[in-house]
Image: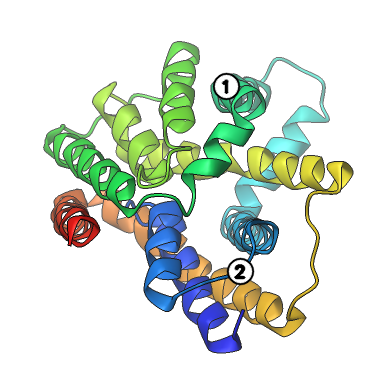
Amino acid sequence: MEVLDALILGIIQGLTEFLPVSSSGHLELGKAILGDNSIPEESLLFTVVMHFATALSTIVVFRKDIWEILRGLLQFKWNEETQFSLKIIISMIPAAIVGVLFEEQLEQLFGSSVLLVGFMLIITALLLWLADKAKNTGKPVSYSNALVIGLAQAIALLPGISRSGSTISTSVLLGNDKTKAARFSFLMVVPLILGKIAKDLLDGELTHTGNSTGLIVGFIAAFVSGLFACTWMIALVKKSKLSYFAIYCLIVGVIAIVVSYS
């Protein structure tokens, strides 16, 4: 992969991982536009590296929250931090099950259909529009909410369904506070990404025979843009500005569908 292409795709990943417009969908569209002809293993490695970069940016932005959670867990008491951690674990279960049982089927969807990405982006637009109309509350995420949000995250494994968009929208539609919904959405994905990377490393699936410079450039671009996007997104959710992203996803989705038929 060329360095310039890696830079562009890294920025796309960093911005779209947190902004509710589907990072996986935009990566696939970006690869199609840039004419990415890398073999599946190389493409998968690049995608995993980009996700690791955004996971790292999440850890940096929420470092104080993560430290408080870890410190609370080390007290070995049934405190707020322990309860929050249990909710995170519950939210991970649906995506973990789908990822393990349908891993090959999901990988085949990536790079296979711009049409699919287009339709999924339209679904993301609908979710964002509905969530933007919901009233803000002070309600925290409950255990049952965590499971439903986890189901939304599992569906977001499809390219074109925004993970942050679907999880935040689902949480808000369940009546949860918008800021707390965004915080939960961003923190719940970190263990999944790190677990997926560890699994791929142990399975020996992440092979690399191409340009290491491209991977490094893409990683840095995704990390830096992810820091910006994560901070910005929290403010946008709080101010109920999701409708703008709904319009964007609708437009890009329609364009992708039109292009796929042309």
In this picture, residue 131 sits left or right of residue 120: left
Pointer 1 with pointer 2, Cβ within 8 A: no
Looking at this view, is 209 or 8 the one in front?
A: 209
Q: Residue at x 46, y 32 (%)?
A: 153
Quadrant hosting residue 252 = bottom left
Quadrant hosting residue 230 = bottom left
In this picture, residue 207 sits left or right of residue 39: right
Name the element at disc 1: helix
- Please rate how many residues cluster around mark 2, counting C-alpha atoms within 10 Å: few if below 14, some from 14 to 19, many from 20: few
What colouring style does the render use? rainbow
Q: Which residue is mark 1?
A: 87
Look at the image and tell me in which quarter the N terminus lies: bottom right
Q: Which residue is mark 2?
A: 38
Amino acid carrying mark 1 in the image: Lys
Rendering coords of residue 38 (x, y %): 61, 69
- Please rate how many residues cluster around mark 1, counting C-alpha atoms within 10 Å: few if below 14, some from 14 to 19, many from 20: many
Quadrant hosting residue 32 = bottom left
Amino acid carrying mark 2 in the image: Ser
- Compared to 240, does 85 lie above or below? above
Q: Residue at x 28, y 49 (%)?
A: 115
Looking at this view, is 70 or 48 the one in front?
A: 48
Rendering coords of residue 3 (x, y %): 60, 87
Dot placed on the residue nearer the N-terminal end, 1 or 2: 2
Looking at this view, is 231 or 54 the one in front?
A: 54
In this picture, residue 259 sits left or right of residue 83: left
- Residue 75's tag is none
- Compared to 158, does 142 lie above or below? above
Closer to the eye: label 1 or 2: 2
Looking at this view, is 98 or 52 the one in front?
A: 98
